[in-house]
Amino acid sequence: MMKRPELIAVLENGLIGSERAQANQLPGLVTVSDAVFQAIRQFVLETEGADELLTLFRQKGCDLIKVRNYVGLLLVTRDIQLEILPKVGTTGEGRASLLRMLRYLRHSPFKTLPNALTSDTRLPLWDVFVSTFLTTVEALVGQGIQQTYRLVEGNERYWKGKFQAGRQLRENAWHAERLAVRYDVLTADVPPNRVLKTTLLYLQNRTVVPALQQRIRQLLSLFDDVSPVDSVADALRESRRTNRLFARYELALRWAEALLGQRAYGVKTGSMDSLSLLFPMEQVFEDYVTHGIRTYWPEPDRVTVQESSAHLVDEHAGIPKFKLRPDILIRRAGRLLVLDAKWKRIDSREPGSSYGIDQADLYQLYAYGKKYGADDLFLIYPANEHFQKPIPSFGYDASTRLHIVSVDPRNRLADEVEKLVQQTLAK
């Protein structure tokens, strides 16, 4: 029986160290055995692209590995898997929050993920992803595995389809018992089905949960007449060129593409193993907030997402330059509100400090305000234990104000948008 990889859960920007580093009591440190630490260290040193995700450094006499601002799954070896979670409360809360936010990541299949409303999410991310894919395929085959006609040219013993006189002379001159014919055959052995079977076979060797293995075996039995593919990329391209009969396959194929490692979500992973599903939290949070406001705002028709009607430079050599693209614009009762979401950790405890706000974010919002003619600008950051309530507003000048507000991914998205409505319209 396949052995489950050792799962190491670490929060984004956290540290991984061997047991000898435990005495240093560093915040965010996850300790592992020396053998596991050396395996991860070797992975960073030898794997192309790994330095984008993990950084080696030394502190207080100990070697450490820092996790960068990506979340998701990373297979270090066949026996070691990193689960990198958003820095939102405990690891359970981080896992639940990530699953909730991924449902709204644009151009991804994750909208079918379970809506994790509790913080007690113990099932590893990989198993959640596999289970959701299987549910998608089960729903698909419940409607029937799609078949289509494929053109076949063969030499048959009886007439069927269209006779090919030229090929008969070339191939069957000495075989009068054979007929060169061309005909259509109804088959399920077509690229979309072949991609799904390939994915099921792949998951069969990478899943140790008995219930998931049983579901995979049941689905594979339905694809007996379908052959796997040699090139997943080619089969996916061909699948998307098929006719509209396979339109209902799109979600399952996107899941297959993600699970087979054919799709990177903003992360270049070089030659890493395909069992790596990583996501840049900046994009995940931005899409989550944008979806919430577009869906739950009281007047959704007043909401514009990613508008690019203004430029930083209005005219240069006869044309405007440098498009400005704020996350959200809201027009209401003669007012224009600009909102931008940033996945950064803010600390509101020290009014005399900069609260951890990046100065570049302030410049960006100031440009938005001036070029779009907005007086009230809003930076939206994720809530944390040190940032729950809005920070006192900043006055850029007499007419332009910047408000710092939060969204807590541990709570219902509709409730968080309602809170934003009250905070923004009260200004």
Image (spheres, rainbow, N blue to C red):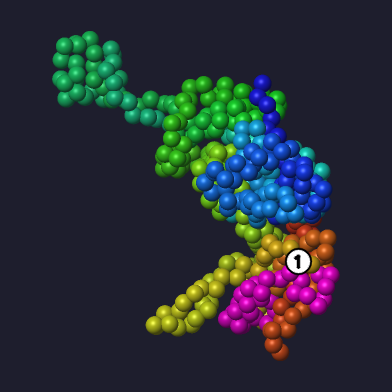
Q: Which of 141 and 356 is in front in this view?
A: 356
Q: In which quarter of the image is the N terminus?
A: top right
Residue hosting label 1: 346
Residue found at x 68% / y 26%: 3
Is 358 inside the magenta-drawn segment?
yes
Residue found at x 51% / y 73%: 323
Give SS at disc 1.
Answer: loop
Expressed as whole percent of the image width and height from the top left, the position of residue 229 reads: 45, 31
Q: In which quarter of the image is the C terminus?
A: bottom right
Residue 113, above or below 164: below
Residue 70, above or below 416: above
Q: Which of 5 and 328 is in front in this view?
A: 5
Expressed as whole percent of the image width and height from the top left, the position of residue 332 reads: 68, 76
Residue found at x 58% / y 53%: 52
Residue range highlighted in magenta: 348-377
Q: Which of 9 and 222 is in front in this view?
A: 9
Dot 1 amino acid type: Ile
Q: Badge 1: how crowded within 10 Å, few (<14), some, or many (20+)? A: many
Decide if residue 241 is on the left or right side of residue 71: left
Expressed as whole percent of the image width and height from the top left, the position of residue 334 reads: 67, 81
Q: In which quarter of the image is residue 276?
A: top right
Q: Which residue in the rendered view is the most extreme toward the front? A: 61
Residue found at x 28% / y 15%: 156
For residue 367, say whether it is visible.
Answer: yes
For residue 333, say whether it is visible.
Answer: no
Is 95 inside the magenta-drawn segment?
no
Mark count: 1
Expressed as whole percent of the image width and height from the top left, the position of residue 176 reads: 19, 11
